[in-house]
Amino acid sequence: MPIVHGWANPEQTVVRVVYPERWNWTECLKTHIELREIVSRRPEVVYMIVDFSKSPNIPADAMSMINKVLALLPENLGAVVLMNMPPMAWVFRRVIIRLKPELASRFPEATSFEEAMSIVNAQRERIA
């Protein structure tokens, strides 16, 4: 199955990205290029929920590929809520946060879609 994405709310201010059990970095980069184009067209801040619930692992070469994905994030992107991260992704997030603590609020963690939306709504209220 491919990585799928779509709007998580009718206002089109939250996009949800769902990773399947198996995926690769080529597909991930292609997805984030598409997302950059879609999100960049919106005039307001857009939030992203990245759902790893079905993905128990991340492919090899994550250190170099994560930087490529981060470079594709659009200017108007708010928080990226990471939901049910695979263990290796969780470790990478922790290392990045330790090196750059200011990124903790930009990449919060959630264990359910409801929790992720709650985080998004709290962040929207802070900037409103």
Image (cartoon, rainbow, N blue to C red):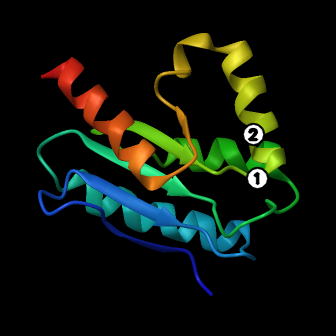
Q: In the rendering, which numbered label is found on residue 102? A: none
Is 114 on the left-hand or right-hand side of 109? left
Q: Is residue 13 above or below residue 103?
A: below
Residue at 14%, 41% in the rendered image:
44
Could you tell me if the residues under marks 1 and 2 are in contact, i.e. CB atoms within 8 Å? yes
Q: Secondary structure at mark 1?
A: loop
Q: CA distance from mark 1 to mark 2?
A: 6 Å
Residue furthest out toward the bottom:
1
Residue 122 x/y as whole percent: 29, 28
Q: Is residue 64 above or below residue 124?
A: below
Instruction: List the residue tagged with mark 2.
Output: 90
Residue 41 x/y as whole percent: 18, 56
Amino acid residing under circle 1: Pro
Whether residue 75 appears in this view of the structure is no
Residue at 59%, 50% in the rendered image:
69
Residue furthest out toward the right:
60
Q: Nearer the viewer, residue 20 or 111?
A: 111
Q: Secondary structure at mark 2?
A: helix
Q: Is residue 94 above or below residue 98?
A: below
Residue 14 x/y as whole percent: 28, 52
Q: Nearer the viewer, residue 99 or 104?
A: 104
Residue at 44%, 54% in the rendered image:
113
Instruction: List the residue tagged with mark 1.
Output: 86
Residue 104 x/y as whole percent: 55, 21
Q: Is residue 81 above or below residue 96?
A: below
Is 39 on the left-hand or right-hand side of 51? left
Residue at 21%, 51% in the rendered image:
13
Amino acid residing under circle 2: Trp
